[in-house]
Amino acid sequence: MLSIHGYVGAEPELGKPDTGGQVVFVLELAKRFARLGYKVDLVTRRFEKQPEFDKVNANLRVWRIPFGGKEFIRKEDMHEHLGDFVTNFLAEANRRGLRYDVVNSHYWDAGWAGQRIAEEMRIPHVHTPHSLGSWKRKDMKGSRGDIERTYRFTERIEKEFLVYRNCDHIIATTVQQAEIVGDDYGIPREHITMIPPGIDEQRFIPAQPARVAEIRSQLKFAPQDVYCVGRAATNKGIDLLVECLPALRRLVPKARLQLAVGAGSERDRERVEAWKRLGGELGVSRQVRWRGYVADEEMADHYRAAGVFALCSRYEPFGMTAIEAMACGTPTVVTVHGGLHEAVEFGLHALYGDPKRPEEYAAMLALPLRYPQLRERLSLEGARFARRQFGWTGIARRTLGVFERFKGRYETEADSGDDNV
């Protein structure tokens, strides 16, 4: 398994740059593969003072390959270093005499590298995009030149196209993502399987009312509080949620925002400061609490403490945090700018709205805060839905089923090849 940007580890530092839902996704999937008896190397980049290996259990280790120097590299700047990653990984794998059955890559950077590794090793390559350059570019605000310089979409989309075209199969995480891969990149539908992300069904569970009251007291939450967690990235729509607060407070006068927004870089801190200024301009600064980074082991209680959870992204391939919040029994309002809203039944599992329309999204947030019967239905049915549809072990079995379809595809080629130099 390849996931090469961000801080990937046995206990990932969530909230750091480029370290969020994808890291959780890949690590949990790897753990389930290991639990089902498969040996897994989760391969990532080695930088700063990280160790070469994290041993997670007898079947799973995180293996860090050095490339691109010792400093953090944001994923948008990973382009020119991918060739070094391929070379360094293959050299070390060959030195250790390692052989694999499949390469499973995550995000376009690992996909580009994974395709070359799979071709060299003569094994299948199954790729999961997580997000799509074409979709993200369409949804980003700002001048075309500034966006291109920051995100390098043209080069990314070109590489995505080659990955999608050349890999053995694509696993999309939503129906919408699968459709865009087909429409924008010209990939045949039979080349794509949709398998959603999963949740830790042992950790993200509802709590009894008395326990919820204790948690709220400890964390200083109130029943009318709206909770949102995410990286300090523009696409997460934190500013859109702040813009919703005046309208929300007209409907629910005691409503507040509890924002667990990680700010691991100077750019992140600048964004958070801009959002704080926005709250001041709108006259709601005192009703917004900036909680900063929330440790992973504390995440479930933060979900449980909220009156409602908000997924307010401008662009969101899926929305793992929303599924986790639903699994904890918290009424959830998701964005229409992503695939998750197509998976839920409105008014039963969750609500959805457009966070770019403050009045509309505020009304959705207000409904479960104003109407106890709706709140209880969303809490009960949302948790059932999340557990039934998104437990990790079931997701892992479905993914392994895709791998099995391509098992042995290149064995004849490998047997007949000339490995002499």
Image (cartoon, helix red, strand yellow):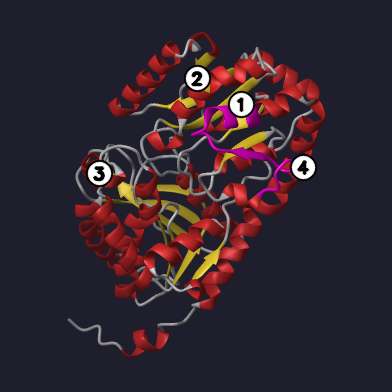
Which is closer to the viewer, label 1 or label 3? 3
Q: Are discs 2 and 4 less than 8 Å apart at CB?
A: no
Residue type at tag 3 = Arg
User: Could you tell which of marks 3 and 4 lies nearer the N-terminus?
Assistant: 3
Q: Could you tell me if residue 374 is visible in this image?
A: yes
Q: Which mark is residue 144?
A: 3
Question: In which quadrant of the rendered view does residue 232 lie?
Answer: top left
Disc 2 designates what residue? 291
For mark 3, does the 10 Å Cα neighbourhood hold few (<14), some (14 to 19), or many (20 or more) residues? few
| Gap in angstroms between the C-alphas marked 1 and 3 | 38 Å
Q: Could you say where residue 122 lies in the image, as x and y percent from the top left?
A: 35, 77
- The N terminus lies in quadrant: bottom left
Q: Could you tell me if residue 127 is visible in this image?
A: no
Which is closer to the viewer, label 1 or label 4? 4
Q: Which mark is residue 302?
A: 1
Disc 4 designates what residue? 381
- At x 31% / y 58%, what residue is drawn? 157
Asked whether 169 falls inside the magenta stretch, the response is no
Residue type at tag 4 = Glu
- At x 47% / y 29%, what residue is drawn? 240
From which residue to which does the magenta span run? 344-365
For mark 2, does the 10 Å Cα neighbourhood hold few (<14), some (14 to 19), or many (20 or more) residues? few
Q: Nearer the viewer, residue 358 or 374?
A: 358
Q: Is residue 289 above or below residue 131?
A: above
